[in-house]
Amino acid sequence: MSGAAVFAAIFIPTIALGQVAKYDVHLEPRKFTLYTDPYNGNQIEVGGFSGLYPVPGKQCAFYVITDRGPAPDFIDEGGDAFKTFAVPNFGPHIIALRLQPNAKAKIEKMIPLRRPDGSTISGLPTTLPATDIPYDFNLDQLSFDEDSIDAEGITIDPWGNFWVCD
């Protein structure tokens, strides 16, 4: 997939008609590539949108919240399952996107979620509840992150503050 455009799709319900509209999200590989497999060149792009909220006062514009990052399950030959994190330092981002007339959506801005000290929030699991033990792609155990979040929804309060749910 090197050098190719990558597309993701978002589906937006249209209340008046009770239908769903599909928009392709165009991702420029160099800007939105999170991981490139060193063996086969396959790429993991930004995606995994968990929540969607309309940008107040802007037509066809939305804020989306990403999931915690690419974390596929790996099952070894003995049947043991591992939760692997392709990009352990990736955490949820708020993405501003605008729907285009050609049924595409353009990412206009990416905002990483941050801790009070300014460092970015990761998507690695917390110890409580210890439902996932994090591993990298070499199956080396990663550390837990008590301040992480696996974002699932987003909204904005009347003062313009984002609220994200886990």
Image (cartoon, helix red, strand yellow):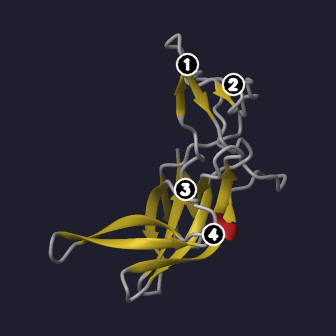
Is residue 23 found left or right of 41 in the rendered image?
left
Front-most of 30 and 161? 30
- Viewer-proximal residue, 96 or 37? 37
Nearer to us of marks 1 and 2 is 1
Task: Confirm or deny contact between disc 1 and disc 2 (CB under 8 A).
Answer: yes
- Earlier in the chain: of badge 3 and badge 4, it is 4
Label disc, if present, on residue 65 of the rendered structure: none
Report how far apart the C-alphas of labels 3 and 2 lie in the structure. Answer: 24 Å
User: What is the three-letter code of the residue carrying label 4?
Assistant: Gly
* Disc ID at residue 139: 2
In 3D space, how far apart are the residues under numbered discs 3 and 1 (Cα atoms)? 28 Å
Helix, strand or loop for disc 4 = loop
Identify the residue at image location x=53%, y=15%. Answer: 77
Which mark lies nearer to you, 3 or 4?
4
Q: Amino acid at mark 3?
A: Thr
Counting residues from the N terminus, which is met first, the one under dot 2 or under dot 4? 4
User: Does 16 sit above or below residue 93?
Assistant: below
Q: Are marks 3 and 2 in contact (CB under 8 Å)?
A: no
Mark 3 vs mark 2: in front = 2
- CA gap between label 4 and label 1 equals 32 Å
Please tell me which residue lies in front, 40 or 64: 40
Give x and y (percent) for residue 61: 47, 80
In the picture of the structure, the residue carrying the numbered disc 1 is 76
Compare marks 1 and 2 and give the one earlier in the sequence.
1
Labels 3 and 2: the sequence-earlier one: 3
Q: Which residue in the structure is indicated by mark 3?
A: 66
**Dot label at residue 3:** 4
Of badges 4 and 1, the one in the foreground is: 4
